[in-house]
Every structure is written in C-alpha cells, then in structure tokens.
Amino acid sequence: MKNLLLATAISMSIPLCAFAQTVTPMHEVAGVPLVEVSVNGTGPYPFVLDTGASVTMVKGPLFQALKIAPTRSVIVAGSLGEGHQQQALPGSLAVAGLGADDIEIDMLEEGQLGVLEGHAQGILGENFLKHFDVLIDNERHALTLDRTNRLARSLAGERLPLSIGDSAAELTHDRLIVRLRATSLVGRSMLFLVDSGANTAVVYPLKNETLLFTRGFASGSIQSLDSDQICRLARTPLTIGSQTYRQAVMAICENRRRDSINSDGLLPTRLFGRLFISHRDKYLIANPKAASKDKDRNIKLAEAITENVTSP
C-alpha cells in the first residue's frame, strides 16, 4: 500500500527563545512526518513525529551509542494497540532548541519502523509533545512548538475538545482523542486517536458491528510496531465538528475491533492542511486561521525572523 515519498523542506530551524516557541521543518517519508530531535544534548537525529504514540522511542543502535541503559520491560500504547518495549531512565529531548527534561525514552527493536527504518532514528511521542501547544503545518512542511499561550491566541477556528472514552472532561493519558462521525459507515459518533504517525484513517468496528463499507474497495497493509495489518480501504466522508472531509481514505483492518483498543480509530493529521493542538487547554483546531487582531503582529514577527536569518 505504501509508496516511499521523500520531500525534504530546505530551510532553517529558528528558535524563538524570547517567546518560548520554535519552528522547525518537517519532511515526509511514506506520508509520515519526520523532524530533527536532540537526545541528551546530542544530535539532532530524524524522528517520526507521532502524536499517536504515548512514549518517545529510540532505535537500539542509537540507544546504545548514547549509553542509555534499559531498566525494565514496559507496555507502550501505539496506534494499532500495545507492545512491549525496553524502558530507560528519563532523558532530555529538544526540537530546534526548545526542550523538556525527565522524558521517558524506550528502545525500538530492529525492524519496528518498517519502511521508515532507514530514514528515522526514533519516534517522538506525546510524552514530549504534551509539554507544548503544537501546530502541524502540512502545507508549509513545518512544525511549531509553543510553551506559552501565544500561539493559541494567534489562531482562530472551531475548537474541538480532546477527551477520554465517553467523557468530555478528561484527556486520555498521553493519547489525543477527538469525536467525529462517518455516517456512510456507521450511525453512531466515534472517538478517534489523533495520529500524525498514521498515513491513513482507520476504523475499529465494535464486536458484531457491520459497517456500510460497500463501494470503492481496495486492499493494503498498515504497519504497527509489532506487525502488519491487512486492511480494506475506501473513500468516505468524515465529519469533524462542523467540517466534512468528503474524500477521506478509510481502512478496516482484520482482527482489529473497538473492544480491544481504547479508540474507535485513527485520524491522520495529514488529512488537514494545518492542525493546531492545545495540550494546555485540551482542544484542537482543524485548519486554523490567523486571529484578526494578530495578523499585523504575525507579519512583523515573520519579517523579523527573515531579517535575522538573512543578516550576515
């Protein structure tokens, strides 16, 4: 199903230290974004940007080269379920100069990155990303992290709450869940994991639930950390808040049911031109626009950044 695509953005990572905010390029492999990450002050190294992973993980050779000692085996929540990984003592991670300490880092076994194996050294998970508000800009191939509320104040759009299970009051532990509808498949609303590490939307039906998946079938495989899943795919409308995405590709995978996974499916962030995630206030905005009062300030900030970069 996957064709390898490598489109590298040529630009500079620009830390905006005065605002506790940074912007860094993303590039794609097989429809999955990669960013440069520093680990314990070394690097940077290319990591998969993965909002669907609860924990940050590093490939074994880098794990060993950095002399990160594993302490125990743990169960890690991934996009397609749980897997056993080797856990290490907490470390420090940074993206374009903006970092966080005491982050759990687990070890990836050989082959677990699949088609990304030769392109990434690890997975940057929610246990790091949750320390910031996040703007994933697929149109400009850029990631923005903000430790303050400045980024949130500069963006406008429909705020969709992030929740756990059927409760709108809680956030799943390091898992971002949003409510959506796919009425051409099933009449009920569903809770999907917001997953930048997925390149296709996936639905997990309830036990004995029949989905109206009758036209436009194709087949392919989707890879998790531990196995490949054989899936059926078709185009179907997805409604998220007041917006409907009519040509979303949806997959149903063999032996994957809602009963064994804590969400109804995966929502890939590449579906959107831009996606803002507020970890601070637990909401997201699909395709946000600049708040009107901040337009002039954003233009001046962009001009100042450009001037700093081009100055000798």
Image (cartoon, rainbow, N blue to C red):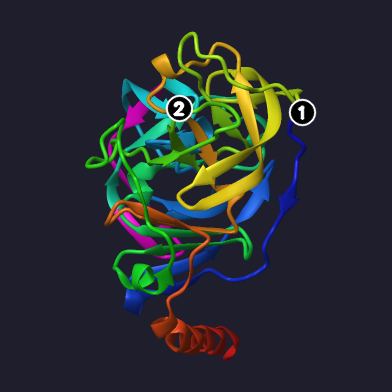
What label does residue 137 carry, if any?
Answer: none
Residue drawn at the location 45% of the way across and 22% of the way down: 81
Residue 44 visible to the viewer? no
Q: Quadrant of the C terminus?
A: bottom right
Residue 220, image x and y in percent? 72, 23
What label does residue 264 carry, if any?
Answer: 2
Q: Is residue 96 magenta?
A: yes
Residue 285, image x and y in percent? 44, 58
Q: Amino acid at mark 1?
A: Gly
Q: Is residue 245 left or right of residue 256?
A: right
Q: Quadrant of the N terminus?
A: top right
- In the image, residue 246 sits, relative to residue 286, either above or below, namely above
Q: Quadrant of residue 235?
A: top right
Count of numbered tags: 2
- In the image, residue 265 sits, relative to residue 297, either above or below, namely above
Q: Is residue 268 magenta?
A: no
Q: Which residues are magenta?
A: 84-100
Residue 239, image x and y in percent? 53, 44
Q: Is residue 218 left or right of residue 115?
A: right
Q: Whole-Å distance between the Cαs marked 1 and 2? A: 21 Å
Element under disc 1: loop
**Considering only order in the chain, which callout, 2 or 1, is on the residue closer to the N terminus?**
1
What label does residue 216 carry, if any?
Answer: 1
Disc 1 residue crowd, few under 14, some 14–19, many 20+, Cα 10 Å = few
Q: Amino acid at mark 2?
A: Asp
Question: Which residue is the extreme one toward the left?
Answer: 169
Residue 162, image x and y in percent? 34, 45
For this rendering, which residue is in front, 274 or 214? 214
Main SS category, magenta section: strand
